[in-house]
Image (cartoon, grey):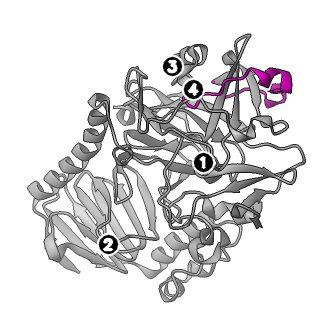
Amino acid sequence: MNNLKVWPHLAIVALVCAVAAGVGVGLWMRHEQTASAEAIPNAARIQRVEGEVALNNSEAVNAQNDQWIAATENQPFSVGDRIYTRDKSRASLAFTGRNFARLNPNTSLDVLALNDQRTQLALRDGSAVFDVGYLNSGDLFEVATPYGAVDFQQPGLYNVGIDNGQVLVSVLSGLAQVVGLGGSGQISKGELLTLVGSTAADAVLSQVNGRDAGYLVDDYYGYQYPRYYDGRYRDYNTYLNDPYYFDPYRRTVSYQYANSYIPGLSDLDYYGDWQNVNGYGNCWAPRVDAGWSPYQTGYWYNDYPYGPTWVSSEPWGYAPYHYGRWAFVGDRWYWVPESVNTTPAYSPALVAFVPFGGNDIGWVPLAPGDVYVPHYYNTNWQPQYLTRDNLYQRVVNLNVPNAVTVVSVDDFNRGDFDWRRVRRADRNMLASANPVLDPLLVTPLRNAAVRSAWGRGKIDVPPGIAR
């Protein structure tokens, strides 16, 4: 066992810088009126929810720190969001298609920065397993704790926890460093670093217990990959000898056809099939009943700064609803991703909105070739557009049977909406339709969306977490 000295002021400076980076993004977006696509933070996916998990976005309009909603599977989250798991509850997060985290019970995690090169998080309480499958040269994946910031310097599996006033960092595979330790602060595979005391004046480096490490790895993989994990990692040495055996990037076909940065690719093989479609290349089709259409099983919620955002209740429903387009070919819907070599850009929903008379609103999936105008909203819900394309477009799928879903504006933001009540637009309704790419340009919908932005499923969290 080795004793390593931590310089408290350096660790604190690192933590402050990490927090400032996240806050800076939010403040910049509040005041800047002309932005580039690179300036908008990426979104990540709440992949799985077990028990009661809460989500808070203090950046949202009129939101307060004590306004938390129940998190659901496939819900996006981004910079400024906070996630909390209650007792006997856990959550799996997908930052990309290869980088994940599993939050254990009674854990609070803040998102400080989220873009192509930088993922910065703050663990305020509890513990989490971080599964880093890919880091490009120069990328930063960092977890701030009360006593220092932990940088993951290589792909690997890491367990970070706060216990009885101590911060514990277990490197199950990979290489980590606590900011402020310099070169001597590296934590190698099979090592445990304990940061002791409120000033982090001392750190203790030791070897992980093989039995405890095997339990951690086995528990994580059993939770993350329940469909095909076979329990082999109960033996920690088996994991060390072949840590990539269950890596979805290596065993899932979908990663061959879409960019691995996209969260949710690992679900597609199980719930659908890839097929080469004439004119579109390799496309994915879900195994669904006849008459099914995209964007019809789930709910809408207003997510700052992206606006109305689709949250699918289909288990595979993240990647195909926030990336790529949908094409209707031979009486079947296909998801058409962008090229593997194309940098993917998150969208809250790739649809056009269709206002109808009588307080009704419809939406239709965008097809390949349809224009999409990326945008975000400031804190007054005023749109900021990133291109100058026309916002009113006659989209390809408008005349596909059952493609346009119609609900009343009053039902649009209802999380408990009975989807058996949805209607399909007929030809007469569509004859004079004027689709629009920015939903908040529709005045009744704008009023409903802004008014109910954080009205769904409010739940209470412990006062200390709320603060």
Amino acid type, mark 4:
Pro
Magenta-colored span: 413-438
Q: Which mark is on residue 49?
A: 1
> Which residue, given by chain and number where applicable, does mark 3 sit on?
450
Amino acid type of the residue that numbered disc 3 sits on in the rendered structure = Val
Q: Please, what is the three-letter code of the amino acid marked with disc 1?
A: Val
Q: Is there CB contact under 8 Å for labels 1 and 3?
A: no
Residue matched to label 2: 137
Q: Which disc is residue 27 wearing?
A: none
Q: Is residue 228 above or below residue 16?
A: below
The image shows residue 403 at horizontal and vertical percentages of: 78, 37
Q: Nearer the viewer, residue 107 or 259?
A: 259
User: Foreground residue, 341 or 416?
Assistant: 341
Between disc 4 and disc 2, whose residue precedes?
Answer: 2
Q: Main secondary structure of the magenta part?
A: loop
Distance from the alpha carbon under mark 1 to that under mark 3 = 26 Å
Q: Earlier in the sequence, mark 4 or mark 1?
A: 1
Identify the residue at image location x=45%, y=26%: 67
SS at circle 3: helix
